[in-house]
Amino acid sequence: MDTLQIISYTGVFVFAVTGVLKARTKRFDIFGAVVLAFVTAYGGGTIRDLLIGVRPVNWVNDNLALVIVVLSTIITFFFKLNTTLIKKSIFWVDAFGIGLFTIVGIQVALRAGISNGYALVMGIITATFGGLLADVLCNKVPSILKPGELYATACLLGGGLYLVMLNYHLQSETSMIISILVIASIRIFAIRKKLQLPII
Amino acid sequence: MDTLQIISYTGVFVFAVTGVLKARTKRFDIFGAVVLAFVTAYGGGTIRDLLIGVRPVNWVNDNLALVIVVLSTIITFFFKLNTTLIKKSIFWVDAFGIGLFTIVGIQVALRAGISNGYALVMGIITATFGGLLADVLCNKVPSILKPGELYATACLLGGGLYLVMLNYHLQSETSMIISILVIASIRIFAIRKKLQLPII
Amino acid sequence: MDTLQIISYTGVFVFAVTGVLKARTKRFDIFGAVVLAFVTAYGGGTIRDLLIGVRPVNWVNDNLALVIVVLSTIITFFFKLNTTLIKKSIFWVDAFGIGLFTIVGIQVALRAGISNGYALVMGIITATFGGLLADVLCNKVPSILKPGELYATACLLGGGLYLVMLNYHLQSETSMIISILVIASIRIFAIRKKLQLPII
């Protein structure tokens, strides 16, 4: 397993914990928590794969995916994970996770022969539609659609930057790291400054 | 670009505006409005393509689709588009758009080797499930499922007529125009007369 | 049509009636009821097929599927089907239907080359995600995610048992019947004893 995979599964773990915490606010049972964890972590990539025609979708047959999601549920079940310190750590890892998911989504789309514009769309979907699906399952309006956190905007700008850098033949790994840092920075800066998109 | 495509993209534009207006009632931000516009315009065709196995789904790599959806959001953002005249125009174009989407959906399904009965189902899905998905994202019961407008019934009757005409080898374009007119007429007539299906 | 298919379509019919009854509580119209019936009966298998890449999804071109779903709606419309006797019958057939859907889902997944662990996931999805989708369309939190009935747990245990028996080369039909009985028994026992999973 290389560095990228370790980072990637760390992102999955944090996304999954976010899903479990969402399930807790709705008083779901343990099965419901596993479903919400899985949907939060893998829902975006699943929608991307369905739309561009990758089959089976990426996580099918990846046993580690299942293990990490179940583990995230068990850990969140036994340790309450509601302390300020842990919430802060989750926030930080989540910001970088979104960056990573955006770039990985773009890469998967490009490899499937998708044009630059739609690869960017697929990157945003990969990073944000897991949370959207989880919100739908919680019977609430997806928070990504409402003013609040420049979540998708960060993915759009950082993902766009990544495509520009690729276009100028910058080294792929360097481009990736820069773009992820940009996405995480925009997201963190936007929350600090309470920036948000205008209401339609 | 031929006449059919121009009509088709006009339909997409109007469906997208409908989505943006729905986003406005929920006070979504601009990103949320683009998502709702896209889902309203392309959601039905996307579900159809996924079910029958067309991949990637129809709009992937169609840059004009993205442009029209973003444009519909920007226009609706700057011009309030809430006047009675504009709402009336939207209603009329929407009625014909539903007709067009039904027939195009049937054609796509038939071309993919789907039987007549399910091609009709796919036509109805194409015309109506974009709005259904948008309603789900707005956290409301999809209006298409509740008594109100003979929306799906119009698609069913007009789409069925189209299949009968195809079966009798009528000229395809004539059949298409007649069926679209029938769907739009039933829909408009039903609203005028407040016709609705019985509650289950 | 063999015994398995007759049992299978009986399960579909009962699942569909469950969907129609759900539509009734929401005062949907007849079209809405057909949609809910179809989604309840075939939604789980549809999600499974999309995830593992079977295309078109299983019910496309199966005219009997459409006939049974429409029939279930019409019958539920004319006969109120709300008597205690009928509800009890539905409950019993539903318990066995869930067992059957789980095992069939596992078989479809294994045939598509899916690993044991994910075949079990696909079995659970087949049995439970139709009801989940129907709940989403009714704008309520999916009951499968909340403490209540050991629904998914029964599928997990019975499906796991099926995979173990397959692994020990037990005769496939015997394994199938035993597993379905186990799933139905756990479900019925859990409801009698009011067993439920802990809240997350």
Image (cartoon, coloured by chain):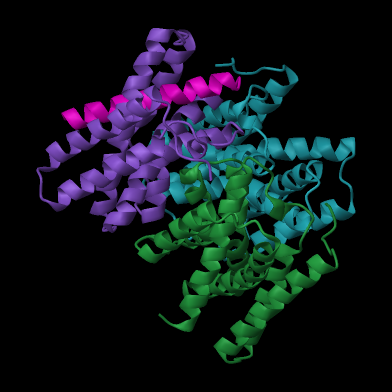
Chain colours: A green, B cyan, C purple
Q: Is residue B115 left or right of residue A83?
A: left
Residue in the picture at 77% in, 54% down: B72
Q: Which residues are magenta?
A: C1-28
Res B55 seen here:
no
Relative horizontal placement of residue A190, taking residue C42 as reference (left or right): right
Camera-side residue: C176 or C1? C176
Tag count = 0
Q: Residue at x 85, y 57 (%)?
A: A198
Quadrant occupied by the N terminus of chain C: top left
Q: Residue C72 at x, y = what percent?
A: 41, 20
Viewed as shown, does residue A93 lie left or right of C47? right
User: Residue C64 appears in which quarter of the rendering?
Assistant: top left
- Asked if the stretch drawn in magenta spans residue C112, the answer is no
Asked whether residue A186 appears in the rendered view, the answer is yes
Q: Position of residue C49 (x, y in %)?
A: 37, 49
Whole-percent x, y for residue C19 in the image: 47, 26
From this view, report whether residue A51 is shown above or below residue B179.
below
The residue shown at (48%, 76%) is: A6
C9 in magenta: yes
In percent of width and height, residue A10 lies at 52, 71
Report the residue at 63% width, 25% height from top. B146
Q: Is residue C1 above or below residue B20?
A: above
Is residue C180 toward the left or the right of residue B59 in the image?
A: left
Q: Quadrant of residue A165?
A: bottom right
Q: Main secondary structure of the magenta part?
A: helix
Q: Who is closer to the viewer here, B147 or B178?
A: B147
